[in-house]
Amino acid sequence: MRRKFALWFAHFIFFLVARVKVEGLDNEIPQGGFIIVSNHLGRLDVPLVYIFLKRDDITIMAAEKYRKYAIVRWFAKQLDAVWVDRFNADFGVLRVCLERLRRGGVVAIAPEGTRSKTEALQEARPGSSYLAAKAGVPVVPIGVTGTEDRLVLAGLRRLKKARVHAQIGKPFTLPPIKGKEREEAMKKYTDEVMCQIAALLPPEKRGFYADHPRLKELLDEKNKV
């Protein structure tokens, strides 16, 4: 009951401050376990996943710095979120997420680790790509715009809702990691994850990955369709 209330309240707050448009729901989102990866612009990014994905087995990441706030702790507990140290490797979190994926759950991750101060993609960390390769589950990329905190706050001051757009891409998978090629593979996989996200964003949001050769390939493929 408390989880249902927390989900209802998350929906209520989101629709109170934002108008959301979701595209790409026809891209055959997997039914079993999979990982959602997206860019990270603002605080609205977290509840957004609950808006378009009607499942009750979603695992989200909660930054340790918010643990001191009672209301955040309560929501994190009801939503079965995982507290994560964004600046250090946390193998305990990876084990928890891996187990939930193997049970058929969904894990939502922002590979950048923190909100982008430039509002464009930052260089990502390898956690999401490692998890995807280790679990062998599909990865669903999402490009988000309109959740920037400054835009949301500006809208609230004018009593206007923020216009949030979420573009869902096609699921893809990453091959298992081989021991001798681990470091090289992790770099390649992380770039793949981020370029898949970048391909769903407008040019000004592609940031660190704007000139990546893999992004060019994805955009060329997209334009041929």
Image (tube, grey):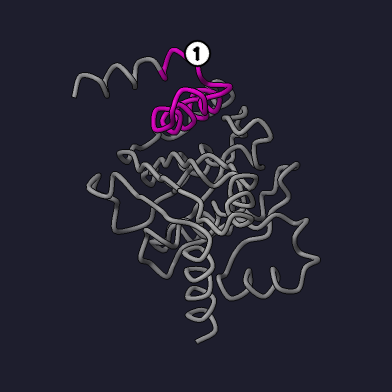
Q: Residue at x 26, y 20 (%)?
A: 221
Q: Residue at x 67, y 55 (%)?
A: 92
Q: Position of residue 35 (x, y in %)?
A: 44, 49
Q: Position of residue 147 (x, y in %)?
A: 54, 47
Q: Residue at x 59, y 24 (%)?
A: 183
Q: Is residue 175 above or below residue 60?
A: above
Q: Position of residue 38 (x, y in %)?
A: 49, 42
Q: Quadrant of the C terminus?
A: top left
> Which residue has dot 1 on it?
211
Where are the magenta residues, as a range? 186-215
Outermost residue to the bottom = 1
Q: Is residue 134 above or below residue 15?
A: above
Q: Amino acid at mark 1?
A: Asp
When asked about the image quadrant of residue 69, the answer is bottom right
* Closer to the camera in the image, 83 or 100: 83
Outermost residue to the front = 158
Outermost residue to the right = 68
How would you rate the neighbour count of disc 1 (Cα within 10 Å): few for under 14, some for 14-19, many for 20 or more?
few
Q: Is residue 9 above or below residue 187?
A: below
User: Is the magenta region chiefly helix, strand or loop?
Assistant: helix
Q: Residue at x 57, y 70 (%)?
A: 80
* Closer to the camera in the image, 172 or 208: 208
Q: Is 19 colored magenta in this rendering?
A: no
24 to the left or right of 16: left
